[in-house]
Image (spheres, rainbow, N blue to C red):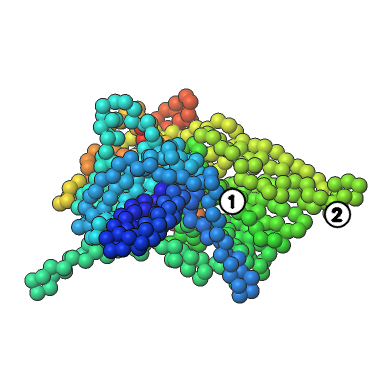
Amino acid sequence: MRMKKMLAVLAAISMLASMGVSAAAEDETAAATTVTTAEEAVTTAATEATTTMETTTATEMTSVETTTDSETTTIETTVATEENVAVSRIMDTAEFTLSGIKFQAVRIDPRDLGSNDPLNQSGGCVGLTINRIQEDGSIVETNLSKIELYILGDYGDSEEGQMKVSSVSNFFSIDGDVLTIDAYRGNVSYQYVNGQFVTAGEAVTTTTTTTGTTTTTTVTSGEAVTEEMLYNKYVSECKPVHSGKETVEYQTVNGVLTSAIIVVEDQDEGVIKTFLITKNEVTLINSVPMGGMLYQMETSTFTCSGYDFYVQLVQPASDGDFRSYLTISVYDKNGNVSITNINGLQVGSAVYTDIGNGTFDWVGNTKLKLSDCFSFDKDSITITRNLYQWGSTQDEYTYSGDTTTYVYDAAKNAFVEGDSPVQPTVLEIHQNDSLTVTGTLSYEWDQINENNNFKHAILTLDTPITVKYMDGEWVGKTETIDSVQIDIEDELSEGTRLEVTGNVMYAHTGHHLRNIVLTDCTYKVLGKKNGGTTLNKPSNTTGTPKTGDVATLPAVALGLTMTAAGVAAIIYKKRK
């Protein structure tokens, strides 16, 4: 249940009740009328407050559909079905002050939410929503909503675990003007700027002194992403000149808008195009042939092998055939989307044809749903295809079909046939090894205390790497690394893709935000094509290949490269 709807109910009850008392003192008849009106208003407010629209899994999506016919624009609105109606159970709340503004943290129990709610799609995660408390005491929502905190039962019955879950305040901290949330997939930090939360480090504070008066001004370095910004970028760069039906889905991760996926009919080319729109670029995901009727579309998100995915089914149709195309994308931890090898795969079709004795009817499923052709579990996905096509004429048809199980190979950013998880390749590393990686640049603050804050460059890798530490206090430890801290002198824009070479240092101070820190770095700015990960050993160090459950490679292997076919996703470390 959305918090502002709950507050609306309480406010309505309080206000209308007081109206009834006042009216009763003045006029008994008027009071009766007021009470009747109050009951109707409260009933209406309560009905609204117990209704919530369906959202998808790990990532929140807002969908808008429009159909253009000449100069007429029709807005299609989908109302939630009964199975999607759910009420959030508030576990507890806590108030805090950030940058002189009061906020309310609300912990949400997922058990009363529908199965399609993002918190339940992530395995039944307890959620966190941040609201702002106005000066008059009213509460309004912010852009941080349903951030995943932990799976119910994860902390067990230990004294330490019970202490942790005893209060929502144990899952966030305030340091100066930075709010840090102990989220399910790792800590995330925000600053509140111009009425919304932005990732910490995107806002900078400048101080100027004029005639003895000090004025502090907070500005944003890098404009925050908005729906209007993304849509305008689409209109200016890639919207077809003559377009038909259009569907827009805005992707929100940890309360922050990251991108839009837009599906549109290009009436000049006779195709349905799917675009990925981010603040910095526009990508054409695929094009499929149009039909003579409006297309249908179904989307969802799911988690498999520790990765979050977005799945889309686009269905063009005509009065003689229906077709269905499946596309799967993967999210990294920053909400960035990249396309896997399941891209525009035709999984269904139906045709109107002679079924015998001169009788014409449909063969195949004209109402194919995503659940008819796609399923998943924690380790794999299964795709079922049923294809009916006309033969040499529309009076005859052919059929083909198959069911295939796939697992996700992060190194290739691809689904490969099989039902056993792909084992990662392990790189053996030592301190001072020369390591070359590619990825996307961002910045984070170490926030040791209010007088000791430093901004550090973080490189989120195109492809996660699994490393085994061969020396130091972590000797023998194996883990998967999705990002590294890098030491570069230049101030580059966030979102820049880089190839970086530096010397490996293991984290050992509070200024080290990742387990691997690359020092003495050199870099080059990359284009859109993704590179790989290369480990170069000093000539005076040797290594021996190991055998076991996973492939092991010696660090001495010069020029060893793991190639990523597209931007690979980040392995999420489940916190227990």
User: Residue 225's quadrant in the figure?
Assistant: bottom left
Instruction: Give percent across and percent down for residue 358.
Output: 90, 50
Is 143 left or right of 237, judged from the image as shown?
Answer: left
Rendered view: 377 above or below 339 = above
Against 443, is 381 above or below? above
Observer able to see residue 113: yes
- The answer to whether residue 183 shows anywhere in this view is no
Picture residue at 43% right of the left edge, 66% below the top:
229
Whether residue 568 sits left or right of residue 109 in the image: it is: right
Q: Residue furthest right?
A: 357
- Residue 188, position in %: x, y? 32, 47
Residue 261 in the figure: left or right of residue 97: right
User: Residue at label 1?
Assistant: 298
Q: Examine the image and state in which quarter residue 275 appears.
A: bottom right
User: Relative to the observer, which residue lies in front, 114 or 475?
Assistant: 114
- Dividing the picture into quadrants, the one containing residue 263 is bottom right
Residue type at tag 1: Glu
What is the crowding at mark 2: few (fewer than 14 residues within 10 Å), some, or many (at least 20)?
few
Residue sitting farthest toward the front? 28
Question: In this rendering, which labeled residue sits more in front, label 2 or label 1?
Answer: 1
Residue carrying label 2: 393
Q: Calculate the distance from the C-alpha at mark 2 to the C-alpha at mark 1.
A: 31 Å
Q: Secondary structure at mark 1?
A: strand
Label 2 amino acid? Thr
